[in-house]
Image: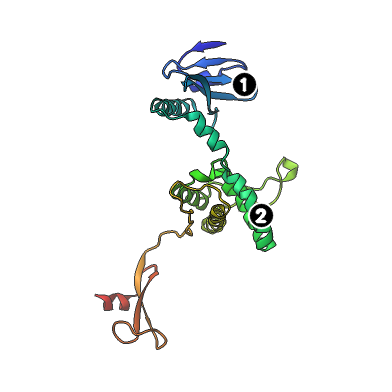
Amino acid sequence: MTASIRITKRVVDALRPGDLIWDSDVKGFAVLCQTKARVYLLEARINGRQRWLTIGEHGAPWTAETARHEAQRLWGQIREGTNIVALREARRQQPTVSELCDRFLADYARFHKKASSTVTDHRNIENHIKPLIGQRTVAEITHADVDDLKRKIAAGRTARPAVPIEKGGNGGLPVTGGPGVANRTLAALSKMMSLAEEWGVPIHSWGMPIRCPSYRPSRPRVLRAIAGPSRSRTGCGNVVFCAQPLEAPEPRIAASLR
């Protein structure tokens, strides 16, 4: 069946294999129902040739609305003269984060890290890095992406309970999140990004490796006085003031600072 109608979730869910629906709002935007998936497409003329551009399969992150917005964004690039086909071909030749992770484990971790550390890195890669950013190319990962990854892991977004083998699972330990897991995962990712630069893998456009700072939940910081002969002389006597996270300042210290 081929028809033209506004593509919505209800329309997509009702499709049968072989059905092709054209969107009535955005030119060239369509959804094709294949045997195992429903795929959003955009048909456009690029450099004098008719091209089919695949937006993605129906399901997260592609819904009828997000795919329509992506089709409109692609049309904007096409009208500006951008060669979308060439960009996509170049992107296919760039390694993904998942591929960088595999190379990190095979070419670096197994030779330069302890067996227990390699096991931990492999677990964090499979449970956190690959599910969140594994399908993206290394070159497009920015500091904002790293910060988002850090917060999702610390918040437990990738956590899941262990499923016994007898219930159809793989057994093993449950996957947990939290600041500690986030820090260990980011340490591995930071090393991978540094190695990517050494291996000649394209990284973010400004050419600087992504540094992954440790995750530290925000806590109030106050001035705390440290006294002792071993401390350097700063200010009055042997008292040195340093910033440390505390629940509340001591009354006598707070009074001395007034």
- Relative to residue 78, is residue 242 depicted above or below? below
Does residue 62 appear anywhere in the picture? no
Q: How crowded is mark 1: few (under 14 residues within 10 Å), some or many (20 or more)?
A: some
| Measured Cα–Cα span from mark 2 to mark 1 | 39 Å
Find residue 38 and report its horizontal and vertical position in percent: 58, 23
- Relative to residue 20, is residue 224 depicted above or below? below
Q: How crowded is mark 2: few (under 14 residues within 10 Å), some or many (20 or more)?
A: few
Amino acid type at image mark 2: Asp
Find residue 248 and report its horizontal and vertical position in percent: 36, 69
Between 245 and 1, the one lying in front of the other is 1
> Quick one: which residue is furthest to the right in this view?
166
* Camera-nearest label, 2 or 1: 2
Callout 1: helix, strand or loop? loop
Which circle's residue, 2 or 1, is located before the other in the chain? 1
At x 56%, y 41%, the residue is: 94
Q: In this view, does 165 lie to the left or right of 37?
A: right
Disc 2: which residue: 107
Callout 2: helix, strand or loop? helix
Amino acid type at image mark 1: Gln
Disc 1: which residue: 34
Does residue 47 appear anywhere in the picture? yes
- Relative to residue 101, is residue 115 depicted above or below? below
* Quarter of the image where the C terminus is located: bottom left
* Quarter of the image where the N terminus is located: top right
At x 39%, y 27%, the residue is: 76
Q: In this view, does 191 lie to the left or right of 243?
A: right
